[in-house]
């Protein structure tokens, strides 16, 4: 398998962490999304990453779809609970974390515009989404042990928190308990090896 990625994509980080947790070998190919003809464009019409290129030539894209694929083909160790409601809660947490990533990216992109071109309403809206999402994650994280196995929801939470920490650390300040939980995982190989620089 080969994963098309970028060094700081939180969505690709979700897949990287899952691959390491499942101990699956995978070649990582870094692509430059600024290049309109980057390697992923021919695999995904939207040109978005991550993209998992399977040994049979099949291209799988969108991190949530890739994670489901990995779970179906390599169910051990499981990253989804077997209980139906616990599975739904886990997937709901993944969706929330993905939303935090989406809002953080939108907030960062708007901040990169010149001051006179920024939309204050958009900045406020995206910041609010990030803060509301982080507040919910913080309530959930109080029950999470750093030593317990990771599931898809917590993997997505790690990727979201890591991305906020990288791009907008000031948004994490009010969530000390959540940040402490994230820091407690820093030495876990799947987290340490995928931390964006």
Image: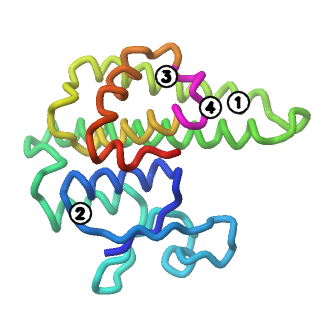
| Label at residue 132 | 3
Q: Are marks 4 and 1 in contact (CB under 8 Å)?
A: yes
Quick one: quadrant of the N terminus?
Answer: bottom left
**Residue depicted at x 31% and y 42%:** 155
Identify the element where label 4 is drawn.
Answer: helix
Q: Earlier in the sequence, mark 3 or mark 2?
A: 2
Q: Residue 8 lies in magenta, yes or no? A: no
Q: For residue 179, what is the image quadrant?
A: top left
| Label at residue 106 | none
Q: Which residue is under mark 4?
A: 126
Question: Which-is-in-front pick, marks 3 and 2?
Answer: 2
Q: For residue 3, what is the image quadrant?
A: bottom left
Identify the element where label 2 is drawn.
Answer: helix
Question: Which-is-in-front pick, marks 4 and 2?
Answer: 2
Q: Is residue 163 left or right of residue 23?
A: right
Residue 136 percent coordinates (x, y): 39, 22
* Foreground of the two, 147 or 47: 147
Q: CA distance from mark 3 to mark 1?
A: 14 Å
Above or below residue 158? Residue 145 is above
């Amino acid at each position: 398998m080969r994963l098309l990625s970028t060094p700081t994509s939180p969505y690709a980080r979700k897949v990287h962490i899952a691959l390491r947790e499942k101990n699956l070998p995978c070649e990582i190919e870094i692509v430059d999304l600024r290049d309109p003809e980057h390697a992923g464009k021919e695999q995904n019409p939207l040109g978005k990453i991550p993209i998992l290129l399977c040994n049979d030539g099949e291209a799988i894209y969108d991190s949530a779809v890739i994670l489901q694929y990995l779970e179906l083909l390599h169910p051990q160790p499981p990253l989804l609970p077997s209980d139906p409601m616990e599975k739904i809660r886990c997937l709901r947490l993944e969706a929330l974390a993905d939303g935090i990533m989406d809002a953080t990216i939108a907030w960062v992109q708007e901040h990169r515009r010149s001051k006179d071109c920024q939309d204050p309403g958009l900045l406020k809206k995206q910041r609010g989404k990030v803060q509301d999402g982080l507040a919910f994650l913080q309530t959930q994280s109080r029950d999470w042990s750093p030593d317990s196995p990771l599931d898809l929801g917590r993997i997505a939470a790690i990727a979201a928190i890591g991305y906020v920490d990288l791009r907008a650390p000031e948004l994490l300040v009010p969530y000390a308990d959540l940040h402490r939980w994230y820091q407690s995982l820093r030495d876990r190989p799947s987290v340490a090896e995928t931390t964006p620089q």
